[in-house]
Image (tube, grey):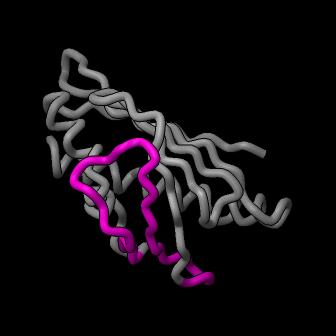
Amino acid sequence: MIHTLQREQTISTTIELAWDFISSPANLDAITPPELSFEIVTEVPAVMYNGLLIEYRVGIPLLGKQTWLTELKHIREGHSFVDEQRIGPYKLWYHYHEVTEVAEGVRFVDRVNYVMPFGPLGEIARAIYVKRQLRHIFDYRREAMIRHLG
């Protein structure tokens, strides 16, 4: 089953600053909760490009550190991009990022489509833990984005 998590927020900043921040792969560390023990393994360029592969390690309770490899793609300079999991904890992870200039500043949109692994057991894990954890991660990200750009 495909699940979707969508978040939107508006921050009083410029589209240039917003894009510079989200298009720098190194900034992912700044908006990830510390308890995930997130680390970027790959040397990353200052600015992303189509086809960029980035390897991370992320702490998952009961499973320990997991490798996560994503590909950055469908980049529309100054507007949107996708990070898609190639290797990682999900059967499917497709994360669309968008920034749009609005009267109040910049609207950020995150839309994640994901599929849990392990069939019915994965769905149980989602109901018990994963859904809540993803909400927590994106709540943290919301506050971190305000700290860095607001």
Counting from the top left corner in percent of width and height, residue 134 is at 52, 56
Vertical side of 135 occupied by 149: above or below? above
Counting from the top left corner in percent of width and height, residue 102 is at 24, 18
The secondary structure that dominates the magenta segment is loop
Viewer-nearest residue: 41 or 31: 41
Quadrant location of the C terminus? Answer: top left
In the figure, is residue 31 to the left or right of 124? Answer: left
Specify whether residue 54 is painted magenta.
Answer: yes
Residue at x 53% of width, y 67% of height: 68
Viewer-nearest residue: 66 or 36: 66
Vertical side of 148 occupied by 34: above or below? below
Counting from the top left corner in percent of width and height, residue 112 is at 55, 43
Magenta residue span: 37-64
Q: Quadrant of residue 17?
A: top left
Residue at x 45% of width, y 57% of height: 53
In the figure, is residue 80 to the left or right of 61? Answer: left
Q: Quadrant of residue 108?
A: top left
Residue at x 39% of width, y 77% of height: 37
Vertical side of 27 occupied by 8: above or below? above
